[in-house]
Image: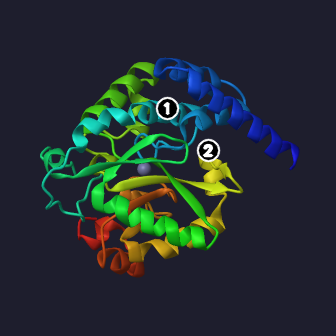
Amino acid sequence: MDARTRLSNMVWMAALACLLVLSLADVLFFSKLASGGEAEAQSASASAGGNADVADGAATGGAADGSANATGGSKAGATGASASKSDGIDYLVLVNKTHELDEDWENKVTLVEATNQRGSTIVVEKQALAAFEELQEELQSEGVVIDLNSCYRSRAKQQELVDQFTQEYGSDYVEKYVAKAGHSEHETGLALDVIPIVNGVEMLTNDEMLAQTDLWETVHTTMPKYGFILRYLPNQEAITGYEYEPWHLRYVGTPDAEKITKSGLTLEEYLGEA
Ligand SMILES: [Zn+2]
């Protein structure tokens, strides 16, 4: 173990301890403090909450990472919406900066809960979760471990994040990094942010995750048959609105996931909405 790994482990353990004892407000405060510090401090803030892109694309930087705490901490709040509802949703639904999710979606989607390895409650659309568990199992048999991090959040939660970030970082920041309510794919329950676990260590910062190129290659080539696509492809920001996010998996079901992946197209292009 080199010094950097040791330091990273220490940071992770410290962050875990913080998570156990701090309230949401405390964690946010902590992350704000950390985001002003050096790289290690930033990764501490990220560790406390994971990579979760508030907005999708919120990505790098302590502030954006820290915001994941808010999402993670309130996941359980979404469970009120997890009561069984009728199915019949469009698994190819397009949500981006210009396509707003139908307000009626929350009444139609069936959300279920899962517990990740960290013990957090994660809310996901029912069929997507079942498919993810199968994907996870196959990957595990190949020695690749990924876990759920940030998945469903309600429109109301997204609005809370927008308000909170506007207050803390200003509207320019929000405009750039945080999706407006109704415009985050995470509101569908079909977007799954996952984290790689390498040798038992969670890769939590965006930099750590982006460095796992071999791991992502395996994940991305295995997942289409389970109905998942890579939503934010490299160099397609002009179309998708977001930079490359290897961790953001989108459930569209089969056979569409295989067709889309094979085509190399973005979901926007596949649907003729680019
Ligand atoms: Zn995401």
| Farthest residue, direction right | 2
Left/right of residue 114 with respect to residue 38 in the rendered view: left
The answer, for residue 239, to whether it is visible in the render is: no
Left/right of residue 207 with respect to residue 172 in the rendered view: right
For numbered disc 2, what is the local secondary structure?
loop
The residue that appears at 82% across and 42% down in the rendered structure is 6
* Residue named by callout 2: 205
Picture coordinates of residue 234 (x, y %)? 50, 64
Picture coordinates of residue 112 (x, y %)? 30, 49
N-terminal of the pair, mark 1 or mark 2, is 1
In front of the other: 124 or 217: 124
Picture coordinates of residue 196 (x, y %)? 59, 56
| Residue 149 against residue 168 in the figure, above or below | below
* Residue named by callout 1: 69
Identify the amino acid type marked 2. Thr
In front of the other: 35 or 191: 191
Picture coordinates of residue 80 (x, y %)? 24, 36
In front of the other: 150 or 83: 83
